[in-house]
Image (cartoon, grey):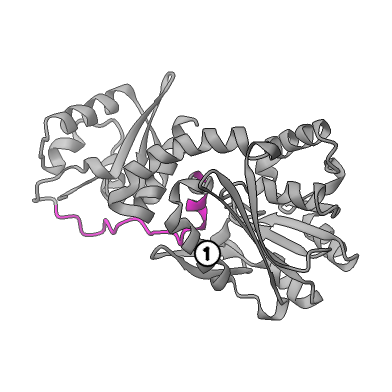
Amino acid sequence: MNLYNEALTKATLKRFFREDHESIYERYQDYLLFNNEHCLKEHDFENVFTLNSQLGNRLYFSFHFGPFLYILYHLIKRMEIDVIFIASQHSRDRVEHFIEFSKTVDLKFNENTVIYADSYTGFRQIVEAMKSGKALFSLIDIGSGSNAIDKSNNVKEIELLQETMLVRNSLFEIAAKLKYPITQGLGYWKDGKRHIELKDIEPEQFSMAAVWKDFEKMLVQYPEQWESYHTIYKFMKPSLPGDTDHIAREQDYTFCKDRYDILKDKDNKYLFAQEYFSFFKISDRTTEIIEYCETNNLTFKLDEIEELFEHNGFVTDLIKYKIIGTC
């Protein structure tokens, strides 16, 4: 995991789990190694299936949670269903890796069984696939699309662990219009076994809030098994930066240690505002100033700190993104 994904993951865990975020992050790191190694090694672990599904050609969906790729593997290999995988262009590397794996186990999965939903022709391909009665599989927590989610017309607001999320709904709106059957798939690791639950949902009864609530119940039990912490912030309803129109210049300010990180990547340094998931490139001098103030728990007036930075509006940005404040 690179520095940026690590910072995003930690910030997301902090938003969702508050006081438990550090211990969950440690378990999450161990889990990623475990799942990457064992998810698709079919005979290493026993499988426990809960099937409330007719299976067949329908829209299957899941989350990047537990042994999620094993659901796709099982549908194709064991159920002998010709499944088209709906992916994001941001995940091409991972899709290509799965294609290479498929060749080693004689799995009917290749470049022709993938639709990139955020490509120019993605929407049309999905509609045509449903009209042709083909089986589709999608992971609905990918956090990306053809445009920013808060600019999209096809989103629903849901609650996840007391956070308001904007989630994409286009796929299920198409299914509802075409009366195309839907199956929810949830997978998780428990007691050294893969647990897979499949449940059919009538398209006209589909509720985005309900399926995310089902997921939330699983997330609370196994928080370290969700791989999307570094991207799911894109689903969070955007927080507006703080109001800087009426800055109280006479107050004492300080750097709020629990609201930012400094990332050092080779010759570049970045200030990461945790609450807004935003990165600011900073100079060596700026880095030294922030670290000195932090180490010595310094308080200061705005006039004093402004004189130290090269960029005149930088202190206003620090206040806006809650990196400095009256903490």
Q: What element carries label 1?
A: strand
Residue 37: x percent and y percent?
60, 32
Give me the residue at 38% from left, 55% from top: 16
Give me the residue at 44% from left, 56% from top: 221
Give me the residue at 31% from left, 49% from top: 20
Q: Mark 1 points at which residue?
A: 166
Q: In this view, does 90 lie above or below 195?
A: above
Q: Quadrant of residue 173?
A: bottom right
In the rendered structure, does residue 48 fall within the stretch colored magenta? no
Front residue of this view, candidates 98 and 274:
98
Q: Which contiguous range is marked in magenta?
A: 230-248
Tell me, yes or no, if residue 119 can be seen here: no
In the rendered structure, does residue 245 fall within the stretch colored magenta? yes
- For mark 1, does the 10 Å Cα neighbourhood hold few (<14), some (14 to 19), or many (20 or more) residues? many
Front residue of this view, candidates 114 and 314:
114
Tell me, yes or no, if residue 144 can be seen here: yes
Front residue of this view, candidates 151 and 315:
151
- Magenta: main secondary structure equals loop
Residue 197: x percent and y percent?
63, 60
Front residue of this view, candidates 134 and 323:
134
Residue type, mark 1 in image: Leu
From the viewer's perspective, tell me whether residue 178 is left or right of residue 229. right
Q: In this view, does 250 lie above or below 153?
A: above
